[in-house]
Image: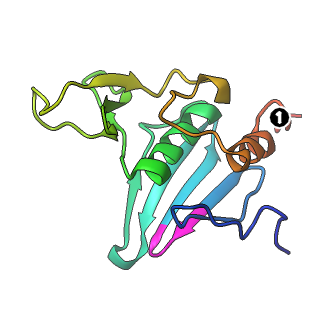
Amino acid sequence: MRSADSGSVDERGWELNRPRRTETEWRRDDETVRCFRFDDGYVSTVVYETRDVTWQLTPGQVPLASALAMATVYRQHSTTPQIDPDGRPFVAVGESGPRQVFEEIADEPVDYVYLDTIRTLEEFPSFIEVSEETRRVYERMSPTRYNTLG
């Protein structure tokens, strides 16, 4: 049985697939972005099915809002978070939006925005659009809504 939220496709071609309490997937072509509960936190990954490759978007377990932010940056901007020497995920943000920077000095001025401190959807940086779909996924997966320990 499909959820009422299943099947919606956004303007970038991502289709919400299997939104559940412990896991949500979005699909586009041969890519699948997953956000799922893992132990005491959440993890986001992107799977490239034709290449049989999975890339972790989070540096490990993070709060739900943080995991959704990293998944949403990838879906909206095709940018994977980078990891600093302390293991913290960030994206560089220039005039054209989020991007990756691989040189010590970027070719344009950028700000570095850390994504691991995000605890609520209201804390999403301005370059991440918080859609109604994202709100529904957050509500469905929220640990405050479902106490899995008792």
Find the magenta span and give its range: 26-31
Q: Nearer the viewer, residue 40 or 36?
A: 36
Q: Position of residue 106 (x, y in %)?
A: 14, 30
Single out the residue that lies furthest toward the bottom. 50
Q: Position of residue 29 (x, y in %)?
A: 47, 75
Single out the residue that lies furthest toward the right. 150
Magenta span includes 133:
no
Observer able to see residue 120: no
Q: Position of residue 24 (x, y in %)?
A: 66, 56
In the picture, which quadrant includes the C terminus?
top right
Q: Position of residue 122 (x, y in %)?
A: 66, 24
What amino acid is at disc 1? Answer: Leu
In the picture, which quadrant includes the N terminus?
bottom right
Determine the residue positioned at 36% across, 46% down.
Answer: 80
Determine the residue positioned at 70% across, 66% down.
Answer: 8
Q: For residue 107, what is the image quadrant? A: top left
Horizontal arrangement in the rendering, residue 72 relative to residue 96 (left or right)? right
User: On the image, numbered disc 1 is attached to which residue?
Assistant: 149
Determine the residue positioned at 64% across, 66% down.
Answer: 9
Observer able to see residue 81: yes
Q: For residue 42, what is the image quadrant? A: top right
Picture layout, residue 30 above or below residue 34: below
Horizontal arrangement in the rendering, residue 100 relative to residue 118 (left or right)? left
Determine the residue positioned at 36% across, 30% down.
Answer: 90
Q: Nearer the viewer, residue 61 or 12?
A: 12
Horizontal arrangement in the rendering, residue 103 relative to residue 100 (left or right)? left
Residues packed near mark 1 inside 10 Å, few (<14), some (14 to 19) or many (20 plus): few
Q: Nearer the viewer, residue 121 or 53?
A: 121
